[in-house]
Image: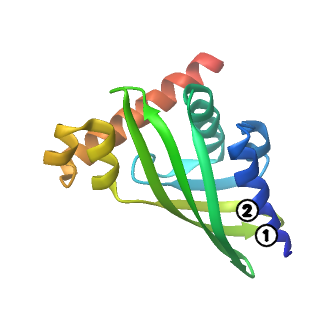
Amino acid sequence: MKPNESLIHHFYTCFKNKDFKGMQACYADNATFSDAAFRDLNAEQVRSMWEMLIKSGKDLRVEYNHVQTDGETGTAEWVAHYTFSATGKKVVNRIKASFIFENGKIVQHEDHFSFYKWSSQALGLPGILLGWTNFLKNKVRKRAAENLRLYMAARN
């Protein structure tokens, strides 16, 4: 197995085992992360995000597959099963991840998923009606950023 492929497997194995410290160690000090909810996070923020999500995701279950690497890039597909805490609704989120590596660490990580499908599950009727709008996307992003900020402030 190639080193970067092994790193992706290690990252998601840690995720499955709710080992946020193991996940955090996979990122370089200059790493960035983005997805539909958490935009343009730096290394400190992304490490805190995974810790926050794992600690708050009481019934979180993760599966992953289709890991591929080619030199300094890689991809994987993963599925998160959890209850969205704000509404109590069950979510099954299918995600495609892309990575860029340097010196055996993740320097760029982007997760792509259907915001509409996610919001329809997590938010129910409001997500079904408004999940396609920038209004709802921006509202979710603002709340995610604030939750992360508060989580990080409480740890310091």
User: Looking at the rendered structure, which numbered label has been put on residue 18?
Assistant: none
Image location of residue 55, percent across then percent down:
62, 27
Residue depicted at 71% across the width and 60% down the height: 106
Residue depicted at 53% across the width and 54% down the height: 79
- Of the residues shown, which amino acid type is indicated by label 2? Ile
- Figure quadrant of the C terminus: top right
Query: Which is more toward the observer, 54 or 16?
Result: 16
Image location of residue 117, percent across then percent down:
31, 54
Q: Is residue 103 above or below residue 80?
A: below
Judged left or right of residue 145, residue 71 is: right
Residue depicted at 35% across the width and 49% down the height: 118
Q: Which residue is mark 1?
A: 4
Q: Residues within 10 Å of mark 2 (few under 14, many from 20)?
A: many
Q: Quick one: SS at disc 1?
A: helix
- Figure quadrant of the N terminus: bottom right
- Of the residues shown, which amino acid type is indicated by label 1? Asn
Q: Quick one: SS at disc 2?
A: helix
Q: Is residue 81 above or below residue 73?
A: above
Q: Which residue is mark 2?
A: 8
Residue 99, picture quadrant: bottom right
Image location of residue 8, percent across then percent down:
73, 62
Q: Are marks 2 and 1 in contact (CB under 8 Å)?
A: yes
Q: Is residue 84 above or below residue 5?
A: above
Residue 27 can be seen, yes or no: no
Residue depicted at 70% across the width and 53% down the height: 12
User: Separation of disc 2 and disc 1 at Cα?
Assistant: 6 Å
